[in-house]
Image (cartoon, rainbow, N blue to C red):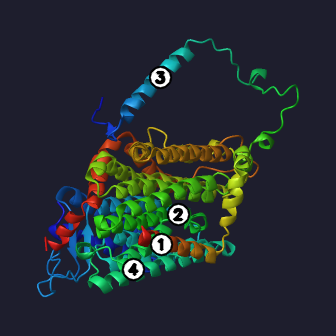
Amino acid sequence: MIPGYITTNAPALLIAVPLLGAFLSPLIGRISRDARALWVLAVMTLTALIGYLVAFLVYTEGTLLYVFGATEATLTIPPDSGGIPIRIIFTIDAMSALMVTIAVTVGFAVILYSLTSDSRRSGLEAYYTIFLLMIGAVLGMVSTGDLFNFFVFLEISSLASAGLIAYKVERGRAVEAGLKYLLVSTIGGIFFLFAIGILYGQYNALNIAMLADMIQWTPLDKLALVLIIAALAAKCGAVPMHFWTPDAYSMAPSAVTAMLVVASQASLYGLFRFCFTLYGVTLNYLTIGWVIIILGVLSMIVGVTMAIPQKDIKRLMAYHAVSQTGYMLLGVGVGLAVLGDQALLSSYGTTAMEGGIFHIFNHAMYKGLLFLTAGAIIYQVGTSDLNRMGGLGHRMKWTMIFFIIGSLAIAGIPPFNGFASKFLIYESVFAFSPILSIIAMVVSILTLASFVKVFHSVFMGPPLPGNEQVTEAPKTMLIGMAILATIVIVSGIFPQFFVQNLIAPAAQALIDQAGYVATVLGGV
Amino acid sequence: MAFATSLSSGFGIWDPVLWIIAIIIGLVIAWLLWRSGVSAYKKGTDQARPYLSGNPEPSKGDVHIRAGNLYWGFTEGIKGYYQRVIPLHTGIATDYLLWIFWVAGILLIIVMVV
């Protein structure tokens, strides 16, 4: 069985392992490239195992608390602190556990994939260090129960992501994309830091549970929430703050892009966490709910319509990532809009939230898969220009199969997982506002049309001149894709299992603000 | 009827397992119908050649419809929308930041007033 000191310290190990692995990676790389590859894979495997252990503990025993520097991991309030949880506390509830599960699963698949896809590049010692830093930062963002600690992990994630986006250089285009991402992230970070300052100045606390216990709806609290929403909505690529996404997603190496999707979702998690857990029913939930819904609808429509005319495979997929983020905002936004009305929450609000949260999980899997297939195509063909591709279905059969699975999932075609989450969103949102549900369905149809275009132009027809010698992607890349494709299929065929065991507890964790506060403060 | 594999939305149910069983049954029926037919197809003969009003068949690469040619009608149909939305994607970093400030400003007004 697993030793007690590992289960007790699992939340800390979740961050410590990737961080330690990141900084030792350049040293191991001095031995050989293979040794570094093995090291990085071992670190990511261990991180994934710890992540699953953490999630298992949360789902079986309830919210996990880990207090850094305390004599006991659950001693949230030291006796001499005046009742204030002064230390950094990781508070991992079912919502955090879901995000941890997503991050380690996609992280493992993309690290495995990138061992081959990026093996031709130089500067790999920095690449893997930054990659593991990024994964560690994402895990920190979704685990922490401290507002300032969230900001620190947000900054680490932003810096690491910007470095990875700029990694290929690509005659300066990748560097430009990295710089744009960094600028947006910096402004977002400043907004967020300013919000923290406002809340700390008023309530003398940084712990989310402590703040949630005291927060009111003063004009300063309103300003802080506006800054938090603007910062995190920009970081997750919500329209009209999405402009960085096509630049960053298209220029980053494909394995990085798949992980960038998860990093964006960590910001989305933050947005939901602070709206529900930090503010809860104290905020004007109907207004803020509608703000989230409008951001979602704009993202769905602008994302998909901008995707259709794209000629670069990764820019096209990036716009679809914006569009799919809209579904998550829509689903959870509807839940927020009826948060204070128990009857409506029970009738359709909770289901809408479950749909939105399930879509976070599904999107990470199928969008990660699609970016990996795009990367495999670019790796073999040498271009991301759709006009210069054709007939690859003859040469890249497995990649084509994985692409079909990802495409059908994102378009919400049964029985893949995208349909299951969209089904929950369509039906519950229809009860809230039929027009929103109809928009969501139309966007799905346009998504299908867009991916039919990609499928036709990349895989159908005879091999175009220059594509005749293309071969299938290397095995490790296929295994990375196969992991995500399997999850897409399994979560599509057995959605009830996932919703019942992972998604519903996550939605409940967001709704149950009092439970979160009581877990940390112990009823203080 | 809800089964253990059914996903309920509170308004309806979705059971992918039943759906897959139905699809498999449909495919089996289609296969049985197809199997009962008479095969007249002969590979490699004139039957397999496309008929283009007697014109010679162009090379396959020349007739492949590429991505840039697809959905021309759709984009043309909502040209007015694209003429407004595409120019907003300037690619200029300061514009990106300006949008964040605009959103924050509008949000602030909404939250403070409503």
Q: Nearer the viewer, mark 4 or mark 2?
A: 4
Q: Which residue is mark 3?
A: B26
Q: Answer whether labels 4 and 2 touch (C-beta < 8 Å).
A: no
Residue drawn at x 45%, y 76% is: A129
Chain holding disc 1: B
Q: Is residue B26 visible?
A: yes
Q: Which residue is mark 4?
A: A195
Q: Nearer the viewer, mark 3 or mark 4?
A: 4
* Mark 1 surroundings within 10 Å by alpha-carbon count, few (fewer than 14), some (14 through 19), many (20 or more): few
- Mark 1 vs mark 2, CA separation in Å: 35 Å
Q: Secondary structure at mark 3?
A: helix
Residue B94, picture quadrant = bottom right
What label sits on residue B109 in the rendered view?
A: 1
Residue furthest to the left? A79
- Mark 4 vs mark 1, CA separation in Å: 17 Å
- Mark 4 vs mark 2, CA separation in Å: 29 Å
Q: Is residue A35 visible?
A: no
Query: In this rendering, do the residues under marks 3 and 1 share a single chain?
Result: yes
Rendered view: A144 above or below A490: below
Where residue A260 sits: x, y (%)?
Answer: 49, 65
Where residue A312 sits: x, y (%)?
Answer: 66, 57
Q: Nearer the viewer, residue A357 or A340?
A: A340
Q: Nearer the viewer, mark 4 or mark 1?
A: 1
